[in-house]
Amino acid sequence: MKMADLVEANYHLLSLMTRLGMGESFGEKTVDEVCRYFSLDTATFLLLCEVYSTEGFEPSLDVLRGCRVEDILRYLHQSHDYYMNSALVTLASNIEKLIAPCEASVKSVIWKFFSDYKTELDNHFAYEEGEVIPYVQGLLAGRRIPGFSIDRFEENHSNIDEKLSDLKNIFLKSLPAQCDARQRSSLLLFIFNLQKDLQRHTCIEDSIMVPMVRLIENPRLSAHRAHPAHKAEDDREELSQREVEILVSVAKGMLNKEIADEHNISINTGITHRKNITRKTGIKTVAGLTVYAILNNLIDINTLK
């Protein structure tokens, strides 16, 4: 198959190819010819293409055994650079333009939420660059770091698109009316695309890199853990009055026990209300719910700690 035809079938592959350093014109070259030109393993490149083309894709161990982990590390390293030095820079600029007409207090709340997310993402990638990638490179060179394994990475692997999803829902449902509608739509499109890209990135880490490294750690491995596909978001409903009250308590920083005592309910009932609030708003983090409450005038920012 010609590389140009592959891209024609799924233009999202251009993003993947850029991160792999495949920046030149393809002419009439085949996929294999282009991969060899850029010193990439063809099977590994096609495996990454599957992730970009198939929702919830999860390869078998036999497929992974025929691929090259060095090329996966190459993709992950370049992705980290793209997210921090390109995608988030663009996102910050677009947010700044969108909220320019807002009151200073609203700007402060939104900007702090974004800044906290950026810091979280930076720490996440710094850990992978400083600990995980060197560990895998050491394994490939015949060295093993005592006390570290890829299972340790997986156990501490956080969801890097959760707060981004919260930010998306905040702009989708709670943005002040004075914000420009066209800028809002443009920003939301960018966030939707970035969120999808981050989900692919996570899939490549969890469903490809992790089991491939397990094979290096233990070549006789016969199975790897399955990872559930991303579930579609439920239809959103209006918050009940009780849920609004619980949301305000969450935004104030109250713990489950404090919320239960405040509203004279059991802890389990309070937890159920919090789950319903997350389901209805689409916002999962306390910080995101706090911003949601402020922008919907459910709580005065001056009352927060």
Image (cartoon, helix red, strand yellow):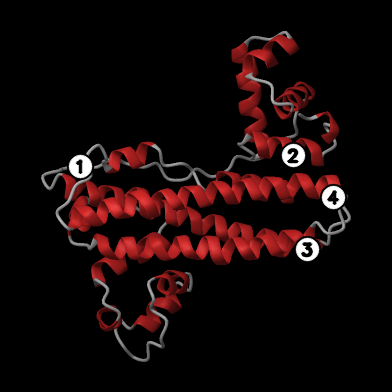
For image coordinates 21% across by 57% down, the residue present is 63
Q: In 3D space, how far apart are the residues under numbered discs 3 and 1 (Cα atoms)?
A: 49 Å
Q: Residue at x 47, y 45 (%)?
A: 230
* Pointer 3 residue: 97
Q: Using the image, tell me which numbered label, if any, was put on residue 207.
A: none
Q: Earlier in the sequence, mark 2 or mark 3?
A: 3
Residue 276 visible in image: yes
First in sequence, mark 3 or 1: give its number.
3
Secondary structure of the residue carrying numbered label 2:
helix
Select label 4 or label 3 by which is in front.
Answer: 3
Residue found at x 29% / y 84%: 30
Quadrant for residue 200, please give it.
bottom left
**Residue picked out by circle 2:** 292
* Mark 4 touches mark 3? (CB < 8 Å): no
Q: Measure the alpha-carbon separation of dots 4 and 2.
A: 11 Å
* Residue 267 horizontal/vertical position (percent): 61, 12
Mark 4 lies on residue: 176
Q: CA distance from mark 1 to mark 4?
A: 51 Å
Mark 3 Cα shell of 10 Å, populated few (<14), some (14-19), many (≥20): some
Does residue 160 sit above or below 70 in this rendering? above
- Furthest toward the left, the residue is 220
Q: Nearer the viewer, mark 1 or mark 4?
A: 4
The residue at which mark 1 appears reads as 223
